[in-house]
Amino acid sequence: MAVKALYDYSYPSRSRQELYGDDQLVNVWWQNNPTFCAAACFRAPKALPWKDFIEQFVEPWAASDPDFRPGSYADWAVDGKPLDPHDASSLAELGVGHKSVLSFRAPTRL
């Protein structure tokens, strides 16, 4: 829902890219998971290799779901576009930008 301000609002965002240096905010969304209702947000270096991002950020977060199986990811996407990640590629090389949404599917039991 849009909000109409009663005055001129000209304050810069407190989460803009230049405040993070070589890091960026990355949102990770496990689609159709009944445990996680929203994406998780992580601060990660742009140059971090994909494999390290998965091992250091995604797997510890996803492991709080008892049905999670490491390596069971499918259908990765970045900002809604299909992604075929390679372990050695950096987040920046894969097109993951500041506040991008990485989404994936993984099997879950209901």
Image: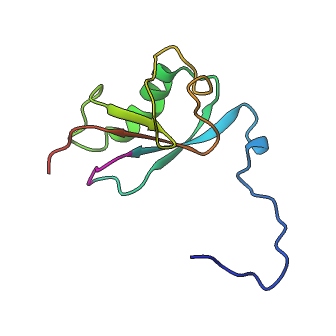
Question: In the image, what residue occupies the spot 62% across and 76% down?
Answer: 2
Give 80 or 23, whichever is nearer the viewer: 80
* Residue positioned most to the left: 110
Q: Is residue 10 left or right of residue 81?
A: right
Most frequent secondary structure within the magenta stretch: loop
* Residue positioned most to the bottom: 6
Classify the position of the N terminus by image quarter. bottom right
Q: Is residue 45 above or below residue 6?
A: above
Over which residues does the magenta segment extend? 30-34
Q: In which quarter of the image is residue 24?
A: top right
Scheme of colours in the image: rainbow
Q: Quadrant of residue 23?
A: top right
Residue 95: x %, y % from top left: 59, 30
Question: In the image, what residue occupies the spot 79% across and 42% down?
Answer: 18
Does 89 lie within the magenta span? no
Residue 38: x %, y % from top left: 41, 55
Q: In this view, does 5 lie to the left or right of 86?
A: right
Q: In this view, does 9 lie to the left or right of 98?
A: right
Residue 69: x %, y % from top left: 24, 31
Question: In the image, what residue occupies the spot 54% across and 17% down?
Answer: 89
